[in-house]
Amino acid sequence: MIPIRPIYLCFALCLILLAGLPVCADDATPEETGLKIAQDAHAREKGFSNFTAQQTMVLRNKHGQESQRQLRVKVLEVPEDGDKSLFVFDQPRDVKGTALLIHAHRESADDQWLYLPALKRVKRISSSNQSGSFMGSEFAYEDLTPQAVEKFTYRYLRDEACGDLTCTVTERFPVDKKSGYSRQVVWRDKEERRVWKVAYYDRKDTHLKTLTLENYAQYLARYWRAGQMTMVNHLTGKSTVLTWTDFQFQTDLNDRDFTQTGLKRVR
Amino acid sequence: MLRRTALHILPFGTVWVLSLVFAINACAEIGIDRDFSGRVNIESRWFPQAGAFSGQGAYAIGFFVEPKLYFADAKGRSLTLSPFFRYDNADSRRTHVDLREAYLLLFGEIGNSEWELRVGIDQVFWGVAESQHLVDIVNQIDLVEHPNGETKLGQPMVQVTYSSGWGIVAFFVLPYHRARTFPGQSGRLRLPLVVGDEDVEYESEAHLDFAARYSQSFGVVDVGLSVFNGTNREPFLMPGADRSGAPILVQHYDQIRQFGLDVQITVGSWLFKLEAIQRAGARNLLGREEDYVASVFGGEYTFYSVFDSAVDLSVLGEWNYDGRGRNATPSRSPNTLENDFFFATRLAFNDVQSTEIVASFLGDAGRSTRALSVKLDRRIYDRLSLDIEAIHLLSIDQADIHYDTRRDSFVDLSLIYNF
């Protein structure tokens, strides 16, 4: 019998948490710990304002045949809601100038518009296609669009070594029934909460895909971004390597670049 | 005549494009962002049945070139140029040139709002429906390109857009009218008489046309309200004679005023669509002025990842209505959309080649006119795509103005090189 009343213990734990030490998993439930890790990771992302980057995707089938995609990405932080993002395709050339505008929302379904340059037509499209393949790659739309903390429930599993670092291993369960996944297992390092690996389980709980992230670099002495993401599909043997380059943070982008008028202006 | 013009323009155009390519390379050195892209399309059409008129062949072979030049400074102010040239061996009227785009784009901020100015030749798309584009009126249709009327001619304009939290307002001043393109004597998919392309008649010559549109998204509802005041884009065709005295159909353009509404509601995998217009000042099929209301109404549903595959299956249905009934003018060949149903399915394979198959049916509820179309698009190599389209005119009612196109079902094979 330890002569400390629970209220003091809680107080002490709170102090430890406030001191910014790693999450103390001793007392919290796995669900609370999982959520805390996600919230902490999200908090570290706050304040980036906006960024632009280039994406190159190399799609590889099981025979080793390759095909390439190139796109420009612009992301605007929306403090009280989901982020706004704009994808502009440069390759393959037949879809050059096609652009996808996404207004993500924390609670409701995202809004999406597609710009078709040949017709100069802006089309509002359904955002129910989350589980669909992005440009024929192994990435689904939901793997690439910003995911708010509220879009999952969480469960902390364990800590384990990942390379030279120690990672927390957490399961997350999509809230949206239209997600193609029953769950995802996420490896984040304890120091910076960077994601190093994600295992995706389909609706039948089969291990469908694994994403590994590499070449992390820090921007504005705060924000970490992976330079390379590799998605392997275990059922088909296909893979996609997504390389990010030319990251620029806090550019002069603003709300007006993420409207339907702005969408028609992309080239 | 048009063909001769086109052949004169071709060498000139080549020099022009080449000098621009050199110019854009020079621009790079003074900090101007530039981009050169475009496509070349080699097309062949096969009409299995003999045409209704002598001189109409079974094959048509041709190509089009559509380069696009883009220059922008560090602030995003840009200049876009996109000439177009098509050659067709079977129909001299299909051999034509156009300037699809040649505009200067400027934009800036006023407080929390934004303004945008486009000056020059541009294309504008309004609306939400698939079977026809009722509210879409800014550009003239380049009908010789395809009977579906999806391709447009460049329109000179000054467009001012103001967007803020309460929506987007765009004003258009349209100083020049383009006449619709129609197939020639030896072309397929033509009317009993050739439609003249010279000596076009206007109710008001050199009229300055105006248009405006307000649009806004209210959650899942996207709404557009538009108004157009000026020269009709749809010609009234009246029997006449060309300069040599041969009988032709003369294009006559009335002054009209049109109010338009387009609405789309996007809920889950459903898209609900409505377009409606009220048009005053245009002539009906009998040549009498008749104010009318027309609408297109429908929905689209997509089944994502069907049977655990990557394939998305969309089904859509639309109903077209025109208050003039049998006196409606033909807005989309071969049907006069006074009471017509449109059904389509789209299979998107979401594969590396972006394979897509669209099958559609357009049928008149009151008459026997029915058409079926199947289209396959596939990227066969990084820069090379293949389009195969078959349009089968199942039947055309004898009372329809397009009765003489009843044997003009065709298969179109296009090979597209994108650069």
Image (cartoon, coloured by chain):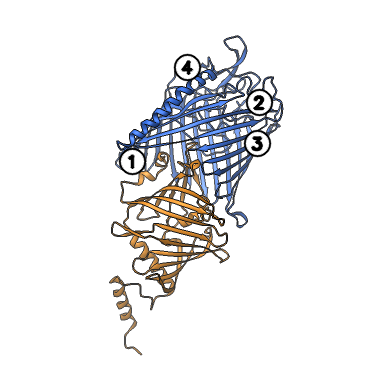
Chain colours: A orange, B blue
Q: Is residue A116 visible?
A: yes
Looking at the rendered image, the disc whose residue lies closer to the viewer, 1 or 2, is 2
Q: Which residue is mark 4?
A: B204
Respond whether the residues carrying marks 1 and 2 are from the same subunit.
yes
Q: Of residues B117 and A231, which is closer to you in this image?
A: A231
Q: Which residue is mark 1?
A: B113
Question: Tag 1, which chain?
Answer: B
Question: Tag 3, which chain?
Answer: B
Is residue B76 rendered to the left or right of residue A147?
Answer: left
- SS at badge 4: loop
Question: Residue A221, how many percent across, how many down?
Answer: 28, 59
What quarter of the picture does the N terminus of chain B occupy? top right
Looking at the rendered image, the disc whose residue lies closer to the viewer, 4 or 3, is 3
State which tag comes first along the sequence, 1 or 2: 1
Question: Tag 2, which chain?
Answer: B
- SS at badge 2: loop
**Labelled pair 3, 2 in contact (Cβ < 8 Å):** no
**Residue, x 60% and y 13% (percent of image)?**
B240
Kind of residue indicated by mark 4: Ser
Q: Which mark is residue A133?
A: none
State which tag comes first along the sequence, 4 or 2: 4
Is residue B221 rendered to the left or right of residue A8?
Answer: right
Q: Which residue is mark 2?
A: B402
